[in-house]
Amino acid sequence: MDLSAVGLTVRFGALAALNRVDLEVAAGERRAVIGPNGAGKTTLLNVIAGEHRPTEGSVRLGGRDATPLPPWQRARLGLGRTFQRSTLFSQLTVADNIALAVRARNRDGWRFWPGREDELNEEVSRRLEAGGIGHLAHRPAGRLGHGERRILEVELALAASPSALLLDEPMAGLSGDERQKTLGRLRSLPKEVTVVIVEHDIDAVTVAPGEAVALLGRNGAGKTTTLMAIAGAIRPSAGTVEIDGYAVAGQPSYRIARRGLSLVPQGRRIFTTLSVRENLTLASRGGDLAQVYSLFEVLASRSASAGSTLSGGEQQMLAIGRALMTRPRLLLMDEPSEGLAPQVVRTLADLVARLRREVGLSILIAEQNLALAFAVADRVYVMERGEVVHEGGVSAFRDDAALHRRYLGV
């Protein structure tokens, strides 16, 4: 179901919580609304859902003017939502909460029909298992942990089989594992379901298998610290790091490396007194020296040369080749273009593209060189003062000069 809003304005006295907001989401699209506290995100969802009447403007659902409709009529049109604050029936069990939502969808109330009760119980069990909370079926909702309550609220909304779904900060307070489960659940929705998700900020960086992701930001934004925390060189004060579903935050770096992660550090940090071959074989953990030489032919020709005699570009190739000798599945690259001439940066971009194509690596690259980041990445995250403030596809970010000026000052 498509939904749209035109000129939405909400005033509380002299305060404009929304000021002529336009929003258009086609059927099946997944959109995120992101902003700081007080930006008006929840107010926008409340107006779309019918909880607040707009001072000005209109809301359309599935092509129909829904502005005068109360929330229950909008729900009948196929609109579902979650709330920022818990709205569970705390005295009822988890299963009974879901059962209520299913009965409301079927308009059964509490009437019992022959054969329907078995169908109801089967659907409730199926939905709880899909949400990863089947083991909590008989626990009162009031005794759930915060993350478990958030997951149940998402399942309540899904139990209504909505055509459009509004999610108000569904990830708030979830652990890394709970986030992944909830994201997987939302991604499994039928493609025709429209989703609008509101989040206060973006605090998770993800890299899918075979994907290249760029981490952008000014000096001091936290890019290197993020990579070092992922690799285990810095112990995070809070938060989680997961590789293929395994929690590795706080573990020694050698254990994290054994999970298939390798870091190409800022400044290369090769052994300058050792030869190229010695640098590579010293790092070997099942790596293929011949493959590295085929990727970086200049290293093969300079195999016996000391690291100190290599140019900056050659040293960067050696640092990447050394990382490949550990047979990683995820490669972290910290400012690989630093100090390199433009022509060498272009060569480096081609080499990274070959790594993805021929080795099948996932790559997370922290960069200030936008040309390199745009050439190699599928998605970008932008960091500012230690926080992720933007996430999106490369094409959209590359073409938006206003975003460049806002977050990168370029």
Image: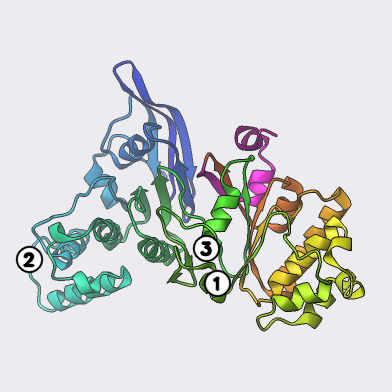
Left or right side of 180 for 388: right
Left or right side of 79 for 227: right
- N-terminal of the pair, mark 2 or mark 3, is 2
Q: Residues within 10 Å of mark 1 (few under 14, many from 20)?
A: few
Q: Is residue 233 magenta?
A: no
* Front-lying residue, 329 or 147: 329
Q: Do labels 2 and 3 touch, CB within 8 Å?
A: no
Q: Quadrant of the C terminus?
A: top right
Q: Residues within 10 Å of mark 3 (few under 14, many from 20)?
A: many
Q: How is the image coloured?
A: rainbow
The three-letter code of the residue at mark 2 reads Arg
Give the image quarter of residue 279.
bottom right
Spatial CA span between label 1 and label 2? 60 Å
- N-terminal of the pair, mark 3 or mark 1, is 3
Q: Disc number at residue 232?
A: 3
Left or right side of 374 for 126: left
Q: Which residue is at the far right?
A: 301
Q: Disc number at residue 142?
A: none
Q: Which residues are magenta?
A: 386-410
Spatial CA span between label 3 and label 1? 8 Å
Query: What residue do we see at 81% from left, 61% from top?
Result: 315
Read off the residue under disc 1.
254
Q: Do labels 3 and 1 touch, CB within 8 Å?
A: yes
* Front-lying residue, 226 or 310: 310
